[in-house]
Image (tube, helix red, strand yellow):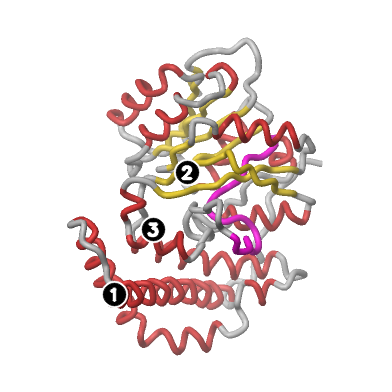
Amino acid sequence: MKPHEATQSLPLISAIVRVSDSSDAVSPSLEALRAQSLDVGRFEVLVVDDGCTDEMWTGIEATSSALHFQCARWKGGGIAGWRNLGLSLARSPIVLFIEEGEVLDPACLEEHYRAHEEHPQSHFAVLGYTGLRGEAERSPLMRYLAEAERRDICCVDSLESCAGDGPGFGCRLPSFKRLYLLDHGGFNPVFPVGTEARELGIRLSRAGLCVARSAGAESVVIRPCSLEEVCTYCYLQGRADWLLARLYPEQDAVTWARLDSVESEWMAIAPLFPSVMKSARELDRFARERCRADLPLDDLTTRLLHRAYAAALRANRIRGVFGAMSEARLDSTPPSLPCTEA
């Protein structure tokens, strides 16, 4: 750990950011932290280095020169691991995890802190709203995920959104009271990359977690996800749903995880899976090329594109559930909850 600048008093809130060799939007995220309405002496930035290059790190240090900034190196792999590391090193009573490619509105940290002041109980978390900007806003896939309100896949969650959140958290995490999160074990590394937030939400809801909304705590996503990234996430999400159903058997997990007909669904999907993916890739490529040329998509093409996206995402999730289910028949060891403090 390398403190960049010491403060005489503890910060009000810690912003925890991960950087890796695939990070391409870290500088805008850090620049947005420099522009926060909350005084730079009242918050800290924890950057967890998960394999970024020396050149990237030089740029990060230059961008962070005006911030109360500390760095930790993480070599264990996995999102749960770097989040737990950042959580353990944070000095403030409130922590906010910032996703790669996420840019905070200038008032975001102040609004999170203000909402926690209004809800000082340890079991209250605060969730803001996230939109699209730049390349992410131009992406046909990202727009589809936003319009379909797929919070389980992308961070987008608009002020007009009205769909239920479902079990656990989506991709966008609220800000937490740090000690509450530590007392309940932090993030469970057993879960596949990107799905540990859902398990955390379910676990904390059993411990009485309440999530307050803050309309002023806004951010935008500027980095678009590719179709391959989203399909991989859906596959991992399916595996996670199977683990969740085993970890929380007393809940109606089979219903919300849609596990009751997985085998028959996969038997129907499997022969068509290559065609489903080929169709989605070709339509996605066509749509992206049209967008790059500033050409619109007609209604029919848009409907076909969205239908192809939905089919590909569903097929990959079912594939993940079926794969985890098949492996579980060979391994009877149940998943475990993270240790909590007595």
Residue occupying the point 75% across, 69% down = 251
- The residue drawn where x is 47% and y is 34% is 48
Q: Residue at x 55, y 51 (%)?
A: 159
List the residue tagged with mark 3. 142
User: Residue 12 lies in magenta, yes or no?
Assistant: no
The residue at which mark 1 appears reads as: 301
Q: What percent of the width, then of the height, locates residue 83?
A: 55, 41
- Residue under the point 50% across and 54% down: 194
For this orientation, the residue located farthest to the top is 8
Helix, strand or loop under label 1: helix
Residue 171 belongs to the span the image colors magenta: yes
Residue tagged 2: 99
Between 179 and 283, the one nearer to me in the picture: 283
Q: Earlier in the sequence, mark 3 or mark 1?
A: 3
Disc 3/disc 1 C-alpha distance (Å): 16 Å
Tell me the chief SS of the magenta region: loop
In the image, farthest residue toward the left: 293
Is residue 297 positioned above or below 85 on the image? below
Decide if residue 88 is on the left or right side of residue 151: right
Dot 2 or dot 1: first in sequence order is 2
Q: Measured from the top left, where is residue 331 in percent x and y?
A: 59, 71
Q: Type of residue at label 1?
A: Thr
